[in-house]
Image (cartoon, grey):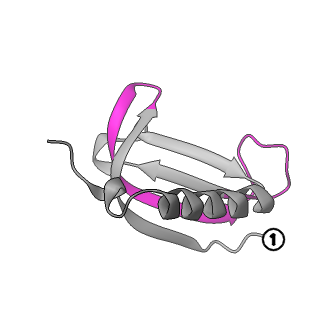
Amino acid sequence: MCTYVTETFECDGAGKGASGWFTLREGRVYVDHPYHSTHEHTVNIDFVNPAEGPSARVAVELTEEAALALVDAIHKALAAAPPGIASAKRR
């Protein structure tokens, strides 16, 4: 079942698309029919920079289990890293 609910969040990072690297500005998460995956429904995550057009997009389609494992892995990686390291800017 499609909920048409999309969670959107501001993003600060970089992604690599078909045209190379670009600055990420927005993330979107939704549960829907996938475009490429063979599953009936997936958790779809898009990282985009709307100002750069459709080519500035990185998309993933994950099963529910894979999406939850990703969330868990992110929590573990951040917990294991020194405080503030993931938000430190390059000098």
For this view, does 82 lie left or right of residue 91?
right
Based on the displayed image, in which of its 4 quarters is residue 77 positioned? bottom right
| Coordinates of residue 48 in the picture (x, y in percent) | 41, 49
| Coordinates of residue 34 in the picture (x, y in percent) | 73, 50
How busy is the neighbourhood of tag 1: few (under 14 within 10 Å), some, or many (20 plus)?
Answer: few
Q: Nearer the viewer, residue 41 or 67?
A: 67
Residue at x 73%, y 40% (from the top left corner): 36
Residue type at the position of mark 1 = Met
> Which residues make up the magenta segment?
17-43
Q: Nearer the viewer, residue 32 or 29?
A: 29
Based on the displayed image, in which of its 4 quarters is residue 65 positioned? bottom right
| Coordinates of residue 28 in the picture (x, y in percent) | 50, 61
Q: Is residue 37 magenta?
A: yes
Q: Is residue 67 magenta?
A: no
Question: Could you say whether the residue bearing mark 1 is in a helix, strand or loop?
Answer: loop
| Coordinates of residue 35 in the picture (x, y in percent) | 70, 45
The residue that disc 1 covers is 1
- Quick check: 20 above or below 29? above
> Residue at the top extreme?
19
- Quick check: 90 above or below 44? above
